[in-house]
Amino acid sequence: MQKSLSIDPQKCTGCLQCEMACSFEHEGMFNPSRSRIRVFTFHQEGEFVPYTCTQCADAWCLQACPVDAIIDNRELGAKAVVEDRCVGCKVCTIACPFGTINYQQATGKVAKCDLCGGDPECVKACPTAAILYLDADQSGYDKMRQWAARSVTAAQATA
Amino acid sequence: MAWTGNILRVNLSDGSIASEALNRDWADQYLGQRGLGSKYLIEEIDPNCDALGADNKMIMATGPLTGTMASTGGRYSVITKSPLTGCIACSNSGGFMGNELKNAGWDMVVIEGSSPEPVYLYIENDTAELLPADEIWGASVWHAGEWLHKRHQDPLLRVSAVGRSAEQGCLYSAIINDLHRAAGRSGVGTVMASKNLKAVAVRGTLGVANLKDPKRFMQAVNDAKKVLAENAVTGQGLPTYGTQVLMNVINELGALPTRNTRDVQFDGAHDISGEAMHAPRASDGRPNLTRNAGCFGCTIACGRISTIDKGHFSVAHKPGYWGSSGGLEYEAAWALGADTGVDDLDALTYANFICNEDGVDPISLGATIAAAMELTDMGVMTAEQTGGIEFRFGSAEALVKGAEWVARGEGFGRELAMGSKRLCEKYGHPELSMTVKSQEFPAYDPRGIQGMGLTYATSNRGACHLRGYTVASEVLGIPEKTDPLTTDGKPALVKAFQDATAAVDSAGLCVFTTFAWTLEDIAPQIDAACEGDWSVDKLLTVGERIWNLERDFNLRAGIGGDQDTLPQRLLKEAAKTGPAKGLVNGLGEMLPEYYALRGWSADGVPSEATLARLGLN
């Protein structure tokens, strides 16, 4: 069963634990600037929004790569960079409409979320459950449930 | 390792910038941040130097856990000699500056001398340069930050800056980072401005690595995060209400200093409480509180993000203040509210925004305005002297104008900017200043919480709650409940809190973790990260060493045991209402026992044996 990251910005406090967990897992250091998930602060609105790769089924980055350095792990539903093959041409960074695959000066390669092999560190690190790892076909289940609950309340109010 | 091992030394007088190796022996004795920064400062400056002269230095110091995944591990401190108190100053800030400095590869930045022209320090990893700041001299912190982000075309730049208040010499100016986090107390911002240094802008991309035992570190960090999550204060109270969870509690306890500490309970407390920040406003139907927010790495997230009603008199026709920004913490809400008798939540929030915008300590500001209000009440001050506005207790207009004037260095604000001690002396009533060692005390009345009297009296940076927060024990029962109305056992309690806090402040962690954590939770994190053997006992010794080191600086600066005292009001005028009715603070009963426990003489000087035991002789 494929699972995907499900992010709820309403729960995010902007603490960057996810960025540290990500960089520690992938780079062996705490370094937000090298995290594959990034939290954006919208100060005036008082919003914090974590953002990362959504693992497109038909992925622009994978299609664009001239050296087949991005592979499709169908079991996980993850698109992962094979570092040995990547030549750092950055074509994938242009192809991706979301900006979630990026070049890293330190390695000369690109880096993106690979779902940590099926056990995402950002999910485990988040103190408020703003990032969840859910059945890819049912990631809207909780939201549907909330709307369903509203109709129950509405029905009770009318009765 | 955890330390980067590198110190950046910047001489503003001659413009030289150099990198030097961290003194590892000192790191072993003082850990980092508050302790290590204080050691460097004390070794390098004359305690009798002019705090606002070129001879004073200013150190920005991180802790070994700053920039790591340890919960709250993003902090840095500014250590210098205070222009407000003459004591050693050490102001601790969250936000995202500490981790950025660490990610740029620096344990500390030592800033010395004074620049002939306004400059800012730009640090990008291992390169640093001083650049002209003429275009932002005279600008607020917020405008300076905006300008720096544009100038460097870098939205990820982290900025610590001073505002117009510091440039104009306000003695309690703060250094603000990330728009609303502050190295807030004792005028550290005033020192920075006196050096013609407008801002420090940092971009760090090197990462924090080289921990002693990464696997054990992550285990310790995860265990400790769990403790915070499961604790009622750090897991529920603080995220929901912030430190403002205390407003109603402390008021009911009869320990909320009100109207310049004339009273110990405020009838408007509920209207300015954490609960009130959640309630929809009558005017626009929205609550004051937008949401909570975390500093770097913090899994508590007590920070408040607030908005002001667009129709409120303070911001009507000022769209610049209509968005969300840093909201009221308990100390600010108390100082700007209960202490001035103002119960208008949005007016307090606006005054708080103004403090952030131009780098002002809201505790000292509120307490100084409260003193002006009492002087007005007594007929000593008139509207003629106070900018045409009567500084009456309860006047939101006076609060708002007072905050704006101090922030911008205008009119009567220049007198308020001296702080309550100097203001009250100028108007012939020094007894009305609610200060210790010239620093305004915060939101706990020592008649209702006896241990806090000793904490204020003996704090090495002048009156302060964060040097020994016995409120945890006396009010919240952490780690165990003590009676707030008696002095019994308080000297030992105060000493224990002071020593433990000095260690926490030196690690890179936030002291709010200690609502849930003891040193038993903290030591394993430090020990897994840092070379050496970091046990609870060693941390307590380090804490005690730091306390005595700071004390020694103050003694050499001429600030001795005779200043370990409280305003007469707290010692002679009994609380009028509440559980503490009829009580004064029993400092006289506590102080001699405290000195004895510290191994100090009867007049508060550390004995040779004490200094030798701590390796300070």
Image: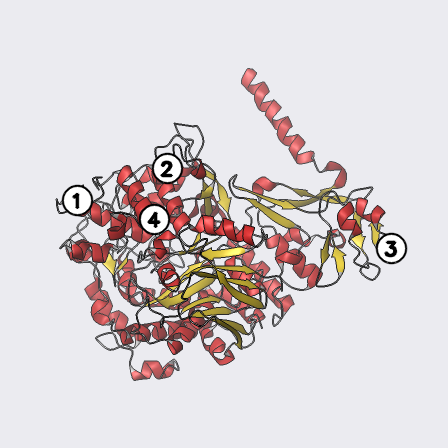
Q: For the residues marked 2 and 1, what is the alpha-carbon distance in whole angstroms?
A: 24 Å
- Chain letter of disc 4 in the image: B
For residue B408, the mark is 4
Per the image, the residue denoted by label 3 is A67
Q: In the image shown, does A65 or B258 lie closer to the viewer? A: A65
Q: Earlier in the sequence, mark 4 or mark 1?
A: 1
User: Given the image, on which type of amino acid does mark 3 rest?
Assistant: Val
User: Given the image, on which type of amino acid does mark 4 rest?
Assistant: Arg
- Chain letter of disc 3 in the image: A
Per the image, the residue denoted by label 1 is B376
Per the image, the residue denoted by label 2 is B346
Viewed as shown, does residue B554 lie left or right of A36? left
The residue positioned farthest toward the top in the image shown: A159
Q: Are marks 4 and 1 in contact (CB under 8 Å)?
A: no
Q: For the residues marked 4 and 2, what is the alpha-carbon distance in whole angstroms?
A: 20 Å
Q: Nearer the viewer, mark 4 or mark 2?
A: 4
